[in-house]
Image: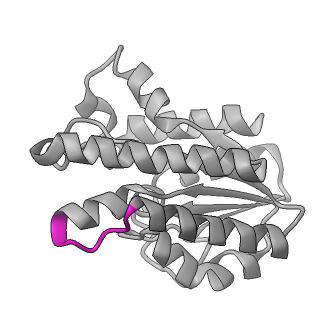
Amino acid sequence: MRYLFQGDSITDCGRGDYENPHAMGCGYPRLLEAELTARDGDCDVMNCGISGNRVVDLLARWKKDCLNLKPDVLTILIGVNDVWHELGNQNGVAAPLFEEVYRMVLRETKAALPDTRILLMGAYVLHGTATDPEWDTFHNEVKARRGITCMLAEEFGLDYVDLQQVFDDALKQYPAEHWAEDGVHPTAAGHWLIAQAWKKAAGI
């Protein structure tokens, strides 16, 4: 089995070498690589997350960083930068375009890799130093991208992981900074949460 994780800095988490899909970083893909390879010595786990990516960046590199790698299981987590980049430098991706481009990515993937299982993880946001200054906008816009992701998962018959619910449930145990250092980027505990949610959705 070949597993590929795709997304932004949450998935990237210090990969360093963007030409090497086996540069795993130190986040949830690394945690999952440890468990998946311990269970199956023949499995191949790859990470092509790139810090700062929006959905349009995924589309631009999709053939090289996904289709050519021919994963059996593909996981995508995207959406927070489509909001964050707009708040920071007016270079985000509006919700209607986010939906259109994400649908293009999925349509292309289903056509090229019809037997690949795809899991979509919904973008999330917590209170933190990066999110609190414009909390209402950040929260509402990420919620819109998450709704689009869930809708696309239903449209294409894909698995969906509601990470916002996962983190919201975790907030009952510890405060936001325990799970995400700035409201977006997970701590070690936050990466563990994502990994556990992925395992539940994947049935592992």
**Where is residue 140 shown, x and y percent of the image?**
31, 42
Residue 26 occupies which quadrant of the picture? Answer: bottom left
Residue at (68% x, 74% y) in the render: 66
**Where is residue 60 shown, x and y percent of the image?**
54, 84
Give the camera-side residue of 81 and 69.
81
Q: Is residue 128 left or right of residue 27?
A: left
Residue at the far front in the pictured view: 96
Residue at the far left in the pictured view: 133
Give the camera-side residue of 105 and 38.
105
**Where is residue 162 shown, x and y percent of the image?**
54, 35
Give the camera-side residue of 104 and 28.
104
In this rendering, the count of numbered labels is 0
Residue 48 occupies which quadrant of the picture? Answer: bottom right
User: Could one spot residue 86 in this view of the protein?
Assistant: yes
Q: Is residue 82 magenta?
A: no
Residue at the far right in the pictured view: 115
Residue 10 occupies which quadrant of the picture? Answer: bottom left
Residue at (14% x, 41% y) in the render: 132
Quadrant for the N terminus in the image = bottom right
Quadrant for the C terminus in the image = top right
Residue at (83% x, 73% y) in the render: 111
Q: How is the image coloured?
A: one colour
User: Would you place residue 46 above or below residue 131 in this image?
Assistant: below
User: Would you place residue 74 above or below residue 67 in this image?
Assistant: above
**Where is residue 85 shown, x and y percent of the image?**
26, 67
Magenta-colored span: 88-94
Give the camera-side residue of 86 and 66.
86
Q: Is residue 93 magenta?
A: yes
Q: Main secondary structure of the magenta part?
A: loop
Q: Is residue 169 left or right of residue 198?
A: left
User: Could one spot residue 24 in this view of the protein?
Assistant: no
